[in-house]
Image (cartoon, rainbow, N blue to C red):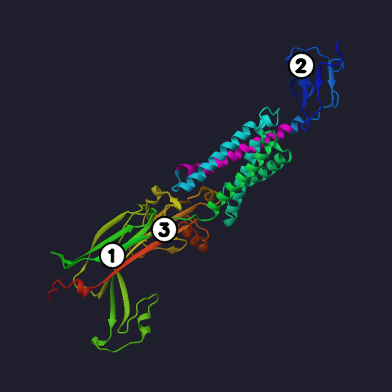
């Protein structure tokens, strides 16, 4: 008969788990005396007296040495699982709009990476019971650590983006607590060296930190700095045609030929467009003689831009106003449109010159997205007085107002900003006005400096084309009215 006991319980490891061998073969690991009895019962030894040294050999402590704290261990596991699941949901929510609908390849990749990191975090949550249990899967600790570091990098980036404007958003109450959780999780996992169960732990650590650093730098660069974008060029032209006399009325029909071409490599949204024809009148020096006036005489009116030696009191009057495109229309790269417009004016007009001003305000599609369906729906000032003015700055009594949400091309930026709206006003009496801000016709303060920054970020700009013709040249083939 052998004097060596046939059941051996090893000393507790750093987590309080004790390895059990039966007859020289590994039988499992146990946290407590109750688990030891269950293990022996499953192996067919229900009657073993664990207190008998002839049956059980205790190493590193007796049958009362069980340092495991199950409540603390399970609480840690539950908090780790909750944080990984919540972080995975946040990454998926942020990344999916870009992964599925971004207009640039780089932003689609960024969105796909965020969704993929969310899946990694969910995998870490699924492996948490194993890591805080018997660790049957050697890679569980490394995957959980990877998920925690991903959460720390994402939440840190979101916090840095939030610091730029410090606007309160619903996501703020998600990534701030999750950032604190990520710091705790990383410290805990690094302290216990959770990667040591991997086949090549040193290589994993080196590759992990190198990949994390490169990913963080790449993501931060694509988010914090405006990426290099394709050039945007527009070609606009306006030209007067030959005037025709109306057969039945003492009016002249004047044709206009307008052309617009997007010669760049980026498609754009039309914010607002306008074609306005002006008639210029002036007071000339006495009966056409060579008498001169002071230059200031031409500049008496506020905002007057023209000055002539022999002409003063220049004034312009709107004769015709029209929109070239509807707000929300898209001009694709390379698209060219030619539009003909005819306006009427009396045959005997008191103007010496006619001017046409063609202008288009646009937003680059690679900088953001407009809710086009809502933007194409006008609010008429006579039916919706609330939308006629913006904080007291009225665009005109008879005004069409267009309003819609506008979002940055990177959803990481969107979740750290208050909602932004693009607004366009068009009035035949006042011309076009546009804005991008958080103002939504509900009162409140407008930060005009921030508004200008948003216009630059979204690549919003205006292009003009003008043409001028003398009325004498325009009417040279029109017979004078009978006196």
Quarter of the image for the N terminus: give it.
top right
* Count of labels in the image: 3
Q: Is residue 97 magenta?
A: yes
Q: Where are the magenta residues, as a range?
A: 73-100
Name the mark nearer the viewer: 1 or 3.
3
Mark 2 burial class by Cα count in 10 Å: few <14, some 14-19, many 20+? some
Quarter of the image for the C terminus: give it.
bottom left
Q: How far apart are marks 2 and 1 (CA)?
A: 94 Å
Residue 385 picture quarter: bottom left
Residue 174 visible (yes or no): no
Q: Residue 40 carries which label?
A: 2
- Residue 103 at what x, y percent from top left? 43, 48
Q: Which mark is residue 238?
A: 1
Residue at 66% x, 41% y: name it.
205
198 relative position to 30: left or right: left
- Residue 170 at what x, y percent from top left? 57, 47
- First reached walking from the N terminus: tag 3 or tag 2: 2
Name the mark nearer the viewer: 2 or 1.
2
- Residue 417 at what x, y percent from top left? 54, 52
197 relative position to 350: left or right: right
SS for dot 3: loop
Q: Residue 266 carries which label?
A: none
Which sits in the foreground, 278 or 157?
157
Q: Which residue lies furthest to the top in this view?
A: 1
SS for dot 2: helix
Name the mark nearer the viewer: 3 or 2.
3
- Residue 61 at what x, y percent from top left? 85, 26
Residue at 76% x, 16% y: name it.
40
Which sits in the foreground, 131 or 409?
131
- First reached walking from the N terminus: tag 1 or tag 3: 3
Residue at 57% x, 40% y: name it.
117
Give the residue number, with chain letter if any, for mark 3.
Answer: 231
């Amino acid at each position: 008969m052998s004097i060596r006991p046939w059941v051996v319980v090893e000393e507790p490891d750093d987590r309080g788990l004790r390895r059990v061998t039966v007859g020289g073969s590994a039988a499992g690991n146990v946290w407590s005396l109750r688990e030891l009895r269950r293990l022996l019962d499953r192996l067919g030894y229900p009657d073993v007296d664990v207190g008998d040294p002839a049956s059980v050999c205790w190493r590193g402590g007796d049958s009362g040495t069980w340092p495991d704290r199950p409540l603390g261990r399970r609480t840690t596991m539950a908090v780790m699982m909750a944080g990984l699941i919540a972080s995975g949901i946040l990454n998926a929510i942020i990344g999916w709009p870009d992964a599925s609908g971004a207009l640039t390849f780089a932003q689609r990749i960024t969105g796909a990476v965020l969704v993929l990191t969310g899946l990694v975090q969910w995998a870490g949550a699924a492996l948490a019971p194993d890591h805080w249990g018997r660790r049957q899967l050697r890679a569980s600790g490394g995957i959980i650590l990877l998920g925690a570091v991903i959460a720390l990098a994402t939440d840190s980036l979101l916090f840095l983006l939030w610091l730029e404007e410090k606007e309160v958003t619903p996501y703020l109450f998600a990534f701030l607590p999750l950032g604190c959780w990520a710091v705790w999780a990383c410290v805990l996992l690094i302290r216990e060296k959770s990667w040591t169960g991997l086949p090549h732990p040193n290589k994993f650590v080196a590759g992990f930190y190198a990949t994390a650093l490169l990913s963080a730098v790449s993501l931060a660069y694509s988010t914090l700095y405006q990426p290099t974008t394709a050039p945007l060029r527009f070609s606009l032209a306006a030209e007067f045609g030959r005037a025709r006399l109306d057969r039945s009325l003492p009016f002249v029909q004047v044709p206009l030929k307008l052309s617009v071409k997007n010669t760049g490599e980026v498609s754009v949204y039309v914010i607002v467009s306008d074609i306005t024809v002006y008639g210029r009148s002036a007071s000339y020096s006495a009966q056409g003689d060579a008498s001169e006036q002071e230059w200031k005489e031409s500049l008496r009116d506020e905002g007057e831009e023209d000055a002539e030696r022999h002409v003063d009191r220049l004034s312009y009057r709107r004769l015709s106003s029209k929109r070239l495109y509807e707000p929300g229309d898209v001009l694709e790269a390379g698209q060219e449109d030619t539009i003909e417009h005819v306006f009427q004016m009396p045959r005997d007009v008191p103007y010496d010159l006619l001017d046409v001003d063609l202008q288009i305000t646009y937003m680059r599609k690679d900088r953001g997205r407009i809710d086009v369906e809502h933007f194409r729906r006008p609010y008429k000032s006579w039916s919706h007085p609330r939308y006629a003015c913006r904080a007291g700055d009225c665009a005109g009594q008879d005004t069409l107002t267009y309003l819609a949400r506008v979002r940055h091309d990177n959803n990481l930026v969107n979740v750290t900003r208050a909602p932004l709206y693009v607004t366009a006003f068009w009035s035949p009496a006042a011309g076009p006005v546009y804005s991008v801000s958080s103002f939504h016709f509900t009162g409140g303060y407008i930060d005009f400096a921030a508004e200008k920054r948003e216009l630059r970020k979204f690549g919003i700009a205006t292009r003009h084309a003008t043409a001028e013709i003398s009325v004498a040249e325009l009417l040279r083939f029109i017979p004078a009215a009978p006196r």
